[in-house]
Amino acid sequence: MHLNRFYAHLYSLLLSGWLVLACTAPEDEKPERLVPTDQMADILTEVHMAESRVSRLGLGSIDSSNMAYKHLEAGIFKKFGVDTAAYRTSYIFYSSHPQDMEIIYKRVTENLQKKIDAKNKGQAKRS
């Protein structure tokens, strides 16, 4: 009888310890291959433009859209010399640090606005 109680308490203790560890915040250390914020902003600018291009293609299936996007995404990562793992790790890190992500997305917004202004200026010259 005492042995069953011991195992019940041991099980409860181990479960409690596991829950405490599982619920603690992740390490606040930067990943080894963290993409710098300026480069991350440039990559995200290109990623959002690629998403827009694919959505405007009007492809009939989600699979086709995903394939087209993956092709564009691979080109973006190659252009910036970043692999998928480094990008995703960096995105997760920045997502858990709202101040950094806010800085990045301010830059993304500025980049996209510059591209819109340049396009509008080019169209105005042709008219």
Image: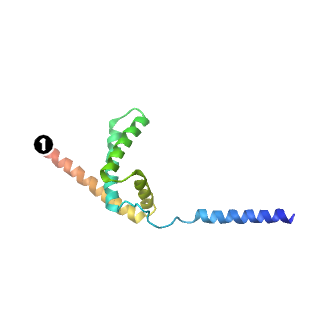
Q: Nearer the viewer, residue 42 or 32?
A: 32
Instruction: Give the answer, above or below, for where 98 lies relative to 116.
Output: below
Identity of the residue drawn at 12% across and 46% down: 125
Left/right of residue 126 with respect to residue 117 in the rendered view: left
The quadrant the N terminus occupies is bottom right
**Residue 112: percent from left, percent from top:** 28, 53
**Residue 26: percent from left, percent from top:** 52, 64
Q: From this viewpoint, which residue is outermost toward the top? A: 60
| Label 1: element kind | helix
Q: Nearer the viewer, residue 14 or 61?
A: 14
Going by the numbered disc 1, the residue's amino acid type is Arg
The quadrant the C terminus occupies is top left
Left/right of residue 122 with respect to residue 33 in the rendered view: left
- Crowdedness near tag 1: few (<14), some (14–19) or many (≥20) residues, C-alpha within 10 Å: few
Identity of the residue drawn at 21% across and 51% down: 117
Instruction: Give the answer, above or below, for where 52 lies relative to 43.
Output: above
Q: Nearer the viewer, residue 95 or 2?
A: 2
Residue ID for mark 1 = 126
**Residue 113: percent from left, percent from top:** 26, 54
Identity of the residue drawn at 36% across and 53% down: 82
Identity of the residue drawn at 46% across and 62% down: 96
Left/right of residue 83 with respect to residue 114 in the rendered view: right
